[in-house]
Amino acid sequence: MKKNLANLRQDYAAATFDEEVAHPHPFSQFSLWFDQAIASNLLEPNAMVLSTVDQQGKPHARVVLLKALDESGFVFYTNYDSHKGQQLQANPYASLVFLWLDLQRQVRVEGSVEKVSPQESDDYFSLRPKSSQIGAHVSPQSQVIPGRSFLEQRYKALEKEFAHTEVPRPENWGGYRLIPERIEFWQGRQSRLHDRLVYEKNSEGWTIKRLAP
């Protein structure tokens, strides 16, 4: 196993990323790369690793899905009572990582986090499939449950209850918006001499710096 892991390597040569072609605004640059990820038919191009820190300073990471992006930030949805929700309540800062291996690209985002408005959460919830809406009511996310049948029985009961009515959004379910202070774009290059351009926010806008790989 140790030998096999040591020999696992890939040399990257798909593209370059230089200051001359970088868009001056990171949201525009992200949108460009994100559109290219979608056009490449990648599986779940909006998947991102969300990292949070608990009250003891211990980091926690999991994969969530990006569901909206605008000039304000990156939006995802979850149960507010989940582990991630409790951690964001205690420490409203987080990071995101997007990895698009087929394009040999990675994007890291760091910043503060706030809840989106109830109206935004209602609007998104109304677009979800009914099965997913019911699932938001069924799951006491992150809590210990006795078994799979616990979820299945609750789902069947609520499916019957909402058979002929709209499913309301649970009060403890909604969106978060990560407001970026720092966004790093990574493009794989040969010999591990990767391109790393980081955008950092200041009072006048955004600065762009190159980092050593």
Image: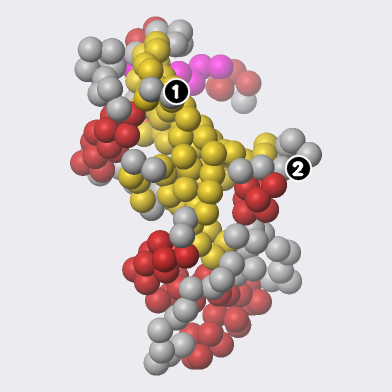
Apparent side of residue 207 relative to residue 181 in the rendered image (left or right): left
Q: Nearer the viewer, mark 2 or mark 1?
A: 1
Q: Residue pushed farthest front?
A: 203
Residue 82's x, y, as percent?
64, 58
**Of callouts 2 and 1, the N-terminal one:** 2
Q: Is 91 rendered above or below residue 102?
A: below
| Image position of 108 (left or right of 127) | right
Within-10-Å neighbours for mark 1: few <14, some 14–19, many 20+: few
Inspect this view and state whether residue 128 appears. no
Kind of residue at badge 2? Gln
Which residue is depicted at the point 60% across and 60% down?
80
Main secondary structure of the magenta stretch: loop
- Magenta range is 6-13
Q: CA distance from mark 2 to mark 1?
A: 28 Å
Residue 93 drawn in magenta: no
Q: Amino acid at mark 1?
A: Asn
Residue in front for this viewpoint, 189 or 80: 80
**Colouring used for the render:** secondary structure
Residue that label 2 marks = 55
Q: Position of residue 34 (x, y in %)?
A: 29, 38
Instruction: Tell me if residue 75 can be seen.
Output: yes
Q: Residue at x 62, y 54 (%)?
A: 85
